[in-house]
């Protein structure tokens, strides 16, 4: 697998705590740090922006990758007025120590540092754009690819598909001093962070949307994949495969809200008997586009258990007579998001088209 996860912030409503449930960390509440909002959005209904200084959000990759790419759309009302004060993306190891940081300068230029170059950091500049490449009051696609290595590492930054900064055969593995941490970072990336260390005097409050994170493995999406939009599609119809029980009304209507309503409406499944898996399948909304390619489909559910003992959950995608299943995961006694990435159509074994996506059914399974 190459795409590790993607995010458009369309599944949390305006409640930041839901974003913190197993996906995002260190997300401050409304009015102090980062907040979900609906006013400046590129795709869907929601995105996230910073409204304070010295805060950040992070999400783990799920792997320790030596090659990692992060693409996102950036909107800012202004450029920073203070040099070296506006990192917009940081690649950290499993101990949250920085290997690579991507900064915007007062001119709109991009700089890439080994380690941190803010708050008194001793980061070392390894690449920069020669001209202004970040503008204001519009979304721009920013992609960073980094290979972490002590001597043969590399970085490349593209803005709207054009390479603006790059370096190869360089040291991209930060030292203790460069990373502002207590210990040398691992020569890998385990999490990505979007800092909110903006310049308050000029309201440098970046908004981030349509994030896609990938590594260098697999046969699909293992290198720059260009501009992407991340759509949140809700269930919109029941099928004959309906082992789960609806709290009330139709099955899909209990799980189709953009802002999860916890125990107000839901589906539930008792312990499986024989057969040993309880399965329900649902039709999905159509994509709002009809042409182009689809990099991946990510199944996402918000799940909890209400009994003692092991309870396990599994996603599936159904395409015609074929299905693909995700990992079997244990459930927690509190609601947690579960996600699985599918990069190919179960029926054809190749990348999805919009038509393929429109014909899919999402499957939920209680396996234990």
Image (cartoon, rainbow, N blue to C red):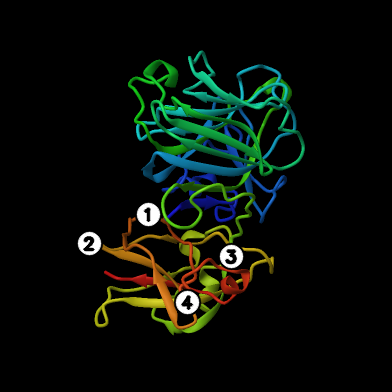
Q: Mark 4 points at which residue?
A: 347
Question: What residue is shown at x 57% (from left), y 71% (from top)?
Answer: 357
Instruction: Please report whichever mark, 4 or 2, sits nearer to the chain's N-terminal start.
Output: 2
- Residue matched to label 1: 334
Going by the image, does 93 lie left or right of 145? left
First along the sequence among labels 2 and 1:
2
Task: Tell me how far mark 3 sits from mark 2, CA to CA.
Answer: 32 Å
Q: Earlier in the sequence, mark 3 or mark 2?
A: 3
Which percent across, then down, holds residue 328? 32, 63
Query: Which callout, 3 or 2, points to the residue nearer the camera?
Result: 3
* Secondary structure state at the residue bearing disc 3: loop
Give whichever of discs 1 and 4 has the lower sequence position.
Answer: 1
Q: In which quarter of the image is residue 141?
A: top right
Q: Quote the CA–CA distance across marks 4 and 2.
A: 36 Å
Between 105 and 238, which is closer to the camera in this rendering?
105
According to the image, label 2 marks what residue? 309
């Amino acid at each position: 697998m190459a795409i590790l996860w993607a995010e458009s912030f369309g599944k949390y409503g305006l409640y930041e705590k839901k974003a913190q449930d197993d996906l995002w960390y260190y997300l401050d509440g409304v009015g102090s740090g980062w907040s979900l909002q609906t006013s400046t959005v590129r795709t869907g209904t929601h995105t996230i922006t910073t409204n304070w200084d010295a805060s950040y959000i992070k999400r783990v990759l799920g792997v320790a990758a030596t090659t990692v790419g992060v693409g996102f759309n950036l909107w800012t009302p202004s450029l920073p007025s203070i040099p070296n004060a506006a990192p917009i993306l940081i690649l950290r190891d499993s101990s949250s120590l920085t290997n690579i940081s991507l900064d915007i300068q007062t001119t709109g230029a991009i700089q890439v540092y080994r380690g941190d170059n803010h708050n008194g950091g001793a980061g070392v500049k390894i690449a920069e754009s020669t001209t202004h490449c970040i503008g204001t009051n519009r979304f721009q696609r920013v992609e960073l690819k980094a290979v972490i290595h002590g001597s043969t590492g590399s970085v490349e930054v593209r803005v709207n598909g054009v390479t603006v900064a790059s370096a190869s055969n360089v040291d991209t593995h930060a030292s203790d001093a460069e990373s502002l941490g207590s210990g040398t970072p691992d020569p890998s990336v385990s999490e990505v962070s979007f800092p909110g260390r903006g310049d308050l005097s000029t309201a440098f409050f970046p908004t981030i949307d349509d994030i896609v994170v990938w590594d260098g493995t697999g046969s699909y999406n293992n290198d720059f994949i260009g501009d992407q939009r991340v759509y949140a599609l809700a269930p919109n119809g029941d099928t004959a495969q309906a082992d789960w029980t609806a709290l009330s009304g139709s099955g899909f209507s209990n799980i189709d809200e953009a802002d999860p309503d916890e125990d107000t409406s839901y589906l539930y499944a008792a312990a499986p008997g024989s057969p040993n898996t309880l399965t329900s399948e649902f039709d999905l909304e159509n994509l709002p586009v009809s042409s182009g390619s689809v990099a991946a489909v990510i199944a996402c559910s918000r799940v909890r258990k209400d009994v003692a003992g092991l309870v396990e959950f599994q996603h599936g995608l159904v395409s015609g007579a074929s299905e693909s299943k995700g990992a079997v995961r244990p459930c927690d006694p509190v609601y947690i998001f579960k996600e699985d990435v599918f990069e190919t159509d179960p029926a054809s074994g190749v990348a999805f088209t919009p038509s393929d996506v429109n014909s899919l059914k999402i499957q939920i399974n209680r396996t234990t």
